[in-house]
Image (cartoon, helix red, strand yellow):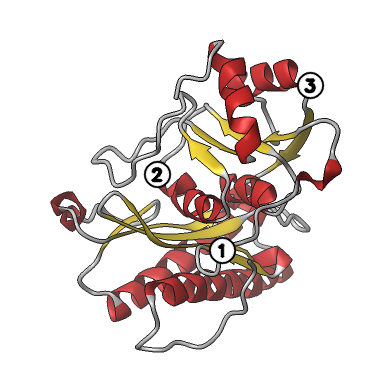
Amino acid sequence: MPVEVGGADSAESDHQLAARIAGEAGERLLTLREQLFASGADHWSVKDAGDDASQSYLMAELRRLRPDDAVLSEEGREDPRRFAGGRVWIIDPLDGTREFAEAGRHDWAVHVALWADGGFLAGAVALPALGVVLTMDPPPPLPDGGGRDRPRLITSRTRAPYAAAIVAQELGCDAVRLGSAGAKAMAVVLGEADIYLHDGGMYQWDSAAPAAVALAAGLHVSRIDGSPIVYNDPDPWLPDFIVCRPELAAPVLTALWGVDPR
């Protein structure tokens, strides 16, 4: 469920830390964005400044409060400690830089997740322009689908992945378009959509925190072949991802493969 952002606490739990720094990074991004727009900064400068500022803040907090943990980040250098196992924070300091750099768009996010021993220990996705932080603990309630007659499938603003087009046709879906991966996955968590399917390539930081929150909410999360997603793989590339209402998992996978491959 959405949570309020509070102050730093040296005794805060992993869940509290993930929620706080995702939310505070988002608040900082909102302020920076307003300042950059007011200054007349160009699109690329806004994107770069947002990435840099959020990365610096998140890394400073994790180094200060969890110095022994490894970090896997879109904007950071490779942390070789993550290859030894143990606790790894997987962060995307600004998911949806293009949307962040466009005035009036809300579909961008901050991702913070903690992975260890084959599972998530914490996760939070901030949607700063909406004033929302969604977390593993407390988890969001499982959305009820809004009484829709046709499933709502959420896709990219600029293209519909091939797998998504197949599912949309087979299940008679209505299409919704949004920007960042986090915003799309959270649209399912919030009940604004029923299915998010991506097969065009992404990285672990694009989906880790959204997966953590969606799983905590009771949604189905998997690769497009139905297999569980494993994070902190040495190769950060993770090409596909499904988040959907649990009762739609079998129809989605059957639409893709002819049978449910799980």
Residue drawn at the location 20% of the way across and 59% of the way down: 86
Judge depth for marks 1 and 2 and give the one in front.
1
Which part of the image, by quadrant, shows the C terminus? top left
Q: Position of residue 177 (x, y in %)?
A: 74, 38
Q: Write down the residue under mark 1.
A: 139
What amino acid is found at the position of numbered circle 1 in the picture? Pro
Q: CA distance from mark 1 to mark 2?
A: 21 Å
Query: Where does residue 240 sit, x and y in percent of width and height?
Result: 47, 31
Of callouts 3 and 2, the N-terminal one: 3
- For image coordinates 77% across by 31% down, the residue present is 175
| Placement of 81 over or under 166, stated as above or below | below
Q: Residues within 10 Å of mark 1 (few under 14, many from 20)?
A: many
Which residue, given by chain and number where applicable, does mark 3 sit on? 172
Cα separation between marks 3 and 2: 30 Å
| Residue 131 falls in image quadrant | bottom right
Residue sitting farthest toward the front: 247
Secondary structure state at the residue bearing disc 3: loop
